[in-house]
Amino acid sequence: MTVTLNDFLPSRKKIIEESLPNFIKYLEAPETLKESMLYSLNAGGKRLRPILVLATLQAYGKNEELGIAVGCAIEMLHTYSLIHDDLPCMDDDDLRRGKPTNHKVFGEALAVLAGDGLLTQCFSVIVNEKNPEVTAEMKIRLISEFVKAAGPEGMVGGQVLDMEAETKTLTLPELEYVHENKTAKLLMFSIIAGAILADASESDIQYLRTFAFHLGIAFQIRDDILDIEGNEELIGKRVGSDSSNEKTTYPSLLTMSGAKEKLAEHIAEAKSALRNVTADASLLEEICDLIASRDH
Amino acid sequence: MTVTLNDFLPSRKKIIEESLPNFIKYLEAPETLKESMLYSLNAGGKRLRPILVLATLQAYGKNEELGIAVGCAIEMLHTYSLIHDDLPCMDDDDLRRGKPTNHKVFGEALAVLAGDGLLTQCFSVIVNEKNPEVTAEMKIRLISEFVKAAGPEGMVGGQVLDMEAETKTLTLPELEYVHENKTAKLLMFSIIAGAILADASESDIQYLRTFAFHLGIAFQIRDDILDIEGNEELIGKRVGSDSSNEKTTYPSLLTMSGAKEKLAEHIAEAKSALRNVTADASLLEEICDLIASRDH
């Protein structure tokens, strides 16, 4: 049975959004802490990362339920990173997805702790998956890859590079390295996680890694373009913030048409890698096109 | 062969302090981030938590090397919690163990990220232990217990309770609940982790949990006492900070002699639980006495 992307995206977003609070609300933890974690978890977003886990399982014809916990763990980790990024000592943002940021509502101290809480708890979500098809060995590998993607060798490292880049103009390879770490690696992990859960071959995992790398960089280039050409209401934040911060972006380095060309190149590379995968990757390919053309 | 505590503590502290940097310095991560993480990891301390892991393995006559990685993971997590606790929006401390706090040296943004990096990386340290005696099932259980001890249901939750307690006087059960979460659960996990690695029986693990709970509360009571009676040079921070912050402490609730009595009660309960454990727990018992009488 063929699933169309128009059905897949809203239905899986709904499943993830219904599942996410269940990993928090039954915890024996202070109510204010749970409230603060749930506030940011429930603040919306595309839920792209968990959707990529499920889409990869779907490509292998596997039960998507295998990926719900890991998908939610990735979304919890993504949410912690947004809470900490928005802090006054970091990007100092008051709004996120059109809503007041966590520290604006709960104060800085609780925002730091809500982030710490989400970051810690997401590892429990992975190891406590009860489905026997998710073996102990899979969980170990998932956590090892997750830390590589999210920790000092991935997202946290990318965030440091991004901060250090604020005071200088980057070259294209430097800019790409920042975004590989800050953004692409967690998107890559989402797809790798789906492949691990689907028990995909090592060769497939390698091709999916290449696919996901180009998808992740394309995602970031589109973000930079939207910061200039985007509609504020659709993207939920002010446009033009990159150029007013004098940040190096793909359009600032390559001009707008050069950035769009680079975006098309990464999408082409992504699709080329995907063609080597021994699964029905049509949905992943459609997601790829969507990321290239998204308006928010 | 009998090991005396006088040999055990400094020799195991040395092993842990030699091992800790190895989990950071080879990471492919920005140098400034690694520097910031290593600064706090290398800032000294008693290394009590990893020592408890090794002492528990020793009680079962097991190879203590099994516990080095997990011990270091716990110390990394403990270190992240100190970095975040010291932030201006939290306790706003300039000194820790007689040295400038992380954000004083590296700035607030990098301190937040160094904490996030240590917290994320410590889970990798556990799953990437290569010794085949540490099975995948043990790793899964270690991570599940670790998150319970360190996350919203443990230390992070305790930190929130502690913040909320600043504006009111707590009852004794409330105070104990704060310290159970904020301090005792991570000490408890250190001992449970040693027991899991030693493949101890479930009954032993239960007795060790009780032992470690009382040990953890005793540790905190001694901390409160040292904040009044301690020597600033030995403890590396100013004394009297609790009473100037009008914090509820064991001495403020029970008087100094009442606090000392409560400390003795918890030490007695700890030892009583320990007597049921089917291992040579003499070293753990000595550590218990040391915690009751420590001067820093």
Image: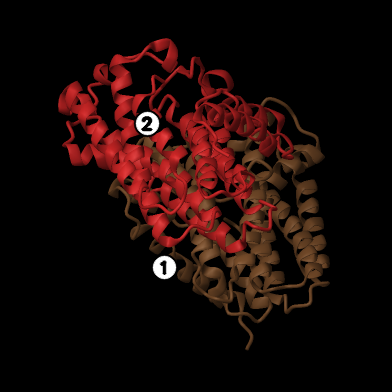
Chain colours: A red, B brown
Pick the front one: B54 or B292: B54
- Residue B176 rendering spot, x and y as whole percentages: 76, 43
**Disc 2: which residue:** A289
Q: Nearer the viewer, mark 1 or mark 2?
A: 2
- Residue A36 rendering spot, x and y as whole percentages: 61, 27
**Residue A158 in view, yes or no:** no
Quadrant of the rendered structure where residue A282 is? top left
Pick the front one: A90 or A193: A193
As drawn, is A171 to the left or to the right of B162? Answer: left
**Disc 1: which residue:** B18
As drawn, is B189 to the left or to the right of B70? Answer: right
Chain of the residue under the numbered disc 1 shown in the image: B
Quadrant of the snapshot with the N terminus of chain A = top right
Q: Which residue is depicted at the point 39% across and 48% down? A: A152
Q: Which residue is depicted at the point 69% across and 31% down? A: B165
Structural distance between the alpha carbons of marks 1 and 2: 50 Å
Pick the front one: A129 or A166: A129
Q: Is residue B136 above or below residue B62?
A: above
Q: Amino acid at mark 1?
A: Glu
Quadrant of the rendered structure where residue B181 is? top right
Q: Amino acid at mark 2?
A: Asp
